[in-house]
Amino acid sequence: MKKLIICFFVTLVAIGCSPKLSVPFERTGAVEYVSGDKNTVTLASTATASGDTEGIYYCERNALENLLFRGIPGSNQENPMIENEGQAYSNARNALDDLILRDGYRKFLIQSYMDDSYKAGKAKTRRQIVKFDLQALRKHLEGAKIIRKFGL
Amino acid sequence: MTRFIIFFGFILSFQVVGQDKAVDTKTAQPTIMAIPFARENQTLRSVYENNELTRIAITKVKEGFDKRGVNTIDLRAKIKQNNNSAALQEGQLDETKDAVIAASGADIYVEVEASANYSSTGNSANVIMTAYDAFSGESLANKTANSPKVYTDNHERLIEKAVEKELDNLLNTIQEKFTDIRENGRTITVRVGVDEGSDLTMDSEIDDSGDLMSEIIEAYMEKNAFKNQYHLQGTTSNRVIFDLVKIPLFDEDGKNYRVSKFASDFRKFMKAKSIDVKQTIQGNNLVFTVKGSK
């Protein structure tokens, strides 16, 4: 009995100490246009992560990065908001990191809710609907000199 | 204390390295005017006043530009301003659009054409938007926008839906062209011809180096074109045509670089080679006529 208890605790400790599954963020093209109007765009973004909080962030970040650097096919934002990603990072890395990595984008997020989710092995794949305020986002990018104002 | 100061300085240096480079390039804001697409024998005013759909589309396009902070020129105000004046040139139909654009002072004009489609499965609206550089006539962007099919007769809403779907894309495409112009320069064409009574041809040797006139002209373009970008379309004994010569947008002092400056510099270069040249500038097209040797 004593051996069994020790074995149980050892197993518990082993499980507790085992490294958590970590799914790194990967920008994918899994961002679909849902709707849009004069000042907003609504996107459905899919991403895989180990937990719910991480999953929401990965979906929102994937949508934002596609909007900023790739453009969304069939939408009112077919062209990327930032024409040259490499140049933008070399000119304004801090501002971009603030926006993307340090939750700065949340100021421009009007809506974000889960549309669907399913287990993918130990990770979880999530489809999130996100709506961005385009005009405010563009003004922010212009103000931070990440993009130029319209003109020559 | 010394250690503290060194440590503090070390931390500060990281802060400085982490800051973004200040990229503060000036932006020349172009003015844009939305105009109706006018078919042959139609004046801008008649199309604007008689076509309600196009009138709505123009208003929506202008609204969209204003929203992006673009300087717009109101066609209706321009037409009112020039009412019954020579600018509209009623009766000289071929020049009407050109005259209104020239009188407006717009850098870019966007031709807008709107139409409505009726069907048993719902009505929809189509809007065609084409942006042109008013100076050169070069097409900058074009978009066709369609509204979804809806059971409604509210065409204003349908047109608004169509315009708002493509307006940002139109502006972004124009902006991409601007970025390209900023980085690679404006395109002009240069034609150098020899006057009938001239004692020179393109095959004449100009100086002791033995270079032909066509060769020194090409060498000039190669040296003075922005980033050395030019394209020689062809050379004959009495003509040299460059269908693409890039010139910068701004000069070294950051002022606008005018086509006339390029023309003037070339004329002076030829004068230094004892060649008399007359110049004509039309938009982005430069035409030089070699009158003869001095």
Image (cartoon, helix red, strand yellow):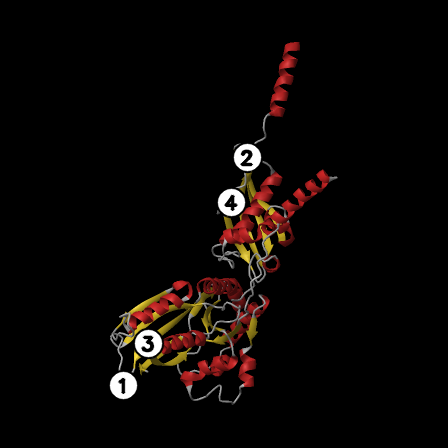
Residue assigned mark 4? A27
Q: Nearer the viewer, mark 3 or mark 1?
A: 1
The residue at 49%/89% (across/down) is B86
Determine if marks 2 and 1 fall on one subunit: no
Q: Which secondary structure, mark 1?
A: loop
- Mark 3 or mark 1: which comes first in sequence? 3
Badge 1 crowding class, 10 Å Cα cut-off, few under 14, some 14 to 19, many 20 or more, is few
* Contact flag, marks 3 and 1 (Cβ < 8 Å): no
Image location (x, y in percent) of residue A109: 62, 52
Closer to the camera, B222 or B146?
Answer: B222
The circle on residue B192 is 3
* Contact flag, marks 2 and 1 (Cβ < 8 Å): no
Q: Which secondary structure, mark 4?
A: loop
Closer to the camera, A128 or B219?
Answer: B219
Q: Nearer the viewer, mark 2 or mark 3?
A: 3
**Pointer 2 chain:** A
In the rendered view, would you say A144 is above or below B279?
above
User: Is A56 situated left or right of A32 in this image?
Assistant: right
Spatial CA span between label 2 and label 1:
84 Å
Residue assigned mark 2? A123
Q: Quadrant of residue B128?
A: bottom left
* Contact flag, marks 2 and 3 (Cβ < 8 Å): no
**Pointer 3 chain:** B
Image location (x, y in percent) of residue B249: 48, 68
Q: Which secondary structure, mark 2?
A: strand
Spatial CA span between label 4 and label 2:
17 Å
In the rendered view, would you say B274 is above or below B92?
above
Q: Is residue A1 visible?
A: no
What is the three-letter code of the residue carrying label 3? Answer: Val
Residue assigned mark 1? B197
Q: Nearer the viewer, mark 1 or mark 4?
A: 1
